[in-house]
């Protein structure tokens, strides 16, 4: 069995976040020691790590609660859970593409600036009239 502090270390959650998850009912069947402190077993830690993943997928607390409720109903809800995860995966792939597009733009812009500074290309800007810019130099 693991204390809150040990569980936080293993799951990389802050104490406040773990306590919040417990208070929200996201960690079912929380056990208590003789001093009424929460304690966790390996299965709890595995589930808490799953909650971390669900959060990183963009699930809200309410969505995590819905997913947990389905999990607690057993095997019969697997198709519904698969559907939820499929939607989250699609959303993550779209975000991944947006991030890759942003990285590509930054790489292109850095290359453009490098070429201008090296004298390979003339500077131009979409923000200023290049003819006006040249006359100010």
Image: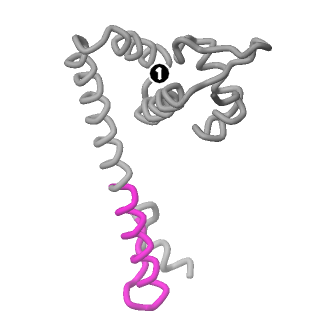
* Residue shown at the point (24%, 18%) measured from the top left: 78
SS majority, magenta: helix
Identify the residue position indicated by label 1 in the image.
60
- List x then y, in percent, for residue 135: 51, 79
- Which quarter of the rendered picture does the C terminus lie within? bottom right
- 118 or 84: nearer the viewer: 84
Q: Residues within 10 Å of mark 1 (few under 14, many from 20)?
A: few
Give the farthest residue toward the left. Answer: 79
Count of numbered circles in the view? 1
- Which quarter of the rendered picture does the N terminus lie within? top right
> Where, by quadrant of the figure, is residue 84 drawn?
top left
**Residues drawn in magenta:** 101-125
Give the farthest residue toward the right. Answer: 35
The question of residue 116 being in magenta is answered with yes
The question of residue 103 being in magenta is answered with yes
* Residue shown at the point (42%, 64%) measured from the top left: 106
- 117 or 78: nearer the viewer: 78
* Residue shown at the point (45%, 13%) measured from the top left: 65
Q: Is residue 82 left or right of residue 128?
A: left
- List x then y, in percent, for residue 18: 63, 25
Q: Is residue 81 left or right of residue 69?
A: left
- List x then y, in percent, for residue 50: 44, 31
How are the residues colored?
one colour
* Residue shown at the point (32%, 30%) measured from the top left: 88
Mark 1 secondary-structure assignment:
loop
Q: Is residue 34 left or right of residue 61?
A: right
- List x then y, in percent, for residue 55: 47, 30
- 117 or 130: nearer the viewer: 117
- 58 or 122: nearer the viewer: 58
- Identify whether 105 is placed above or below 116: above
- Identify whether 116 is placed above or below 127: below
């Amino acid at each position: 069995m693991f204390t809150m502090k040990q569980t936080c270390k293993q799951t990389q959650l802050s104490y406040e976040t773990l306590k919040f998850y417990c208070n929200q009912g996201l960690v079912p069947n929380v056990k208590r020691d003789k001093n009424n402190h929460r304690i966790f077993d390996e299965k709890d830690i595995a589930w808490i790590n799953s909650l971390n993943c669900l959060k990183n997928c963009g699930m809200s607390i309410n969505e995590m609660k819905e997913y947990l409720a389905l999990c607690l109903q057993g095997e019969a809800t697997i198709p519904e859970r698969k559907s939820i995860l499929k939607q989250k995966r699609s959303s993550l792939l779209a975000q991944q593409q947006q991030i890759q597009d942003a990285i590509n733009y930054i790489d292109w812009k850095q290359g453009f600036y490098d070429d201008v500074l090296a004298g390979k290309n003339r500077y131009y800007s979409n923000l200023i009239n290049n003819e006006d810019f040249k006359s100010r130099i």
